[in-house]
Amino acid sequence: TQLLKQSPQFLSIQEGENLTVYCNSSSVFSSLQWYRQEPGEGPVLLVTVVTGGEVKKLKRLTFQFGDARKDSSLHITAAQPGDTGLYLCAGGKRSQGNLIFGKGTKLSVKP
Amino acid sequence: ETGVTQTPRHLVMGMTNKKSLKCEQHLGHNAMYWYKQSAKKPLELMFVYNFKEQTENNSVPSRFSPECPNSSHLFLHLHTLQPEDSALYLCASSQDSTVNNEQFFGPGTRLTVL
């Protein structure tokens, strides 16, 4: 059973385009984190959202946590080749104390 | 040296070998984690140590044996592995094992079992 489903699995776009990737679950999470992983490296945390409906912005990246805290989205404006990487979402549940990761969205931004 | 470091970065071993992966964090954190990352699968949590005590063993086969001598160091001892154990093994640390805490990852060890 895949607790956190990320879509799309793969995305290839041209520089300057906008995109949105999704992280969905039937479970409620107390927090949700987004990471970016580049080839040959470990994941790097981008943002943590904890409140239903919360929106956080990190330069050209906008993160939203769903009202029911079951889903999240990441929107990138005017994508650049440096945005290329694997975007992972991870949900946290206080009852479990550990993060549950999705499979990730592999983004490729071509110049 | 800052952040989370892992050695070796690449490891090729036979099924009868014994090897160890090392992780060191320079962040003053109290929790450390081992994850396995395989192609087409989500990151799988293997072990969690909080204040040097193992608090999670996620049904990991006994051919993987963790060791946490202090809050800064974490090892993963490997013996009689199988080819399906080939994967990227990631170490992470966080302030403690509270779920909202940010986890900092090392670069990983790419393991190939022949």
Image (cartoon, coloured by chain):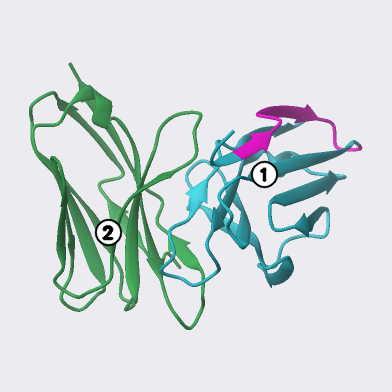
Chain colours: A green, B cyan
Q: Is residue A34 left or right of residue A80?
A: right
Q: Residue at x 55, y 67 (%)?
A: B96
Note whether B46 is above or below A45 in the view shown: below
The chain containing the residue under callout 2 comes to: A
Q: What is the spatial separation of the Cα atoms under label 2 and label 1, in whole angstroms?
A: 31 Å
Q: Residue at x 83, y 53 (%)?
A: B63
Can you give x and y, in whole percent of width and height, for residue B104 in the image?
49, 49
- Where does label 1 land, which residue? B24
SS at mark 1 in the image: strand
Can you give x and y, in whole percent of width and height, for residue A25 in the image?
31, 69
Note whether B33 is above or below B22 in the view shown: below
Q: Amino acid at mark 2?
A: Cys
The image quarter in which residue A50 lies: bottom left
Query: Which quadrant does the C terminus of chain A fall into?
Result: top left
Q: Residue furthest bottom?
A: A95
The image quarter in which residue B79 lies: top right
Residue B61 badge? none
Q: Residue at x 47, y 44 (%)?
A: B40
Q: Amino acid at mark 1?
A: Glu
Magenta residues?
Answer: B5-16
Can you give x and y, in whole percent of width and height, for residue B2 in the image?
55, 37
Note whether A54 is above or below A13 in the view shown: below
SS at mark 2 in the image: strand
Residue B10 drawn in magenta: yes
Residue A23 badge? 2
Residue A64 drawn in magenta: no
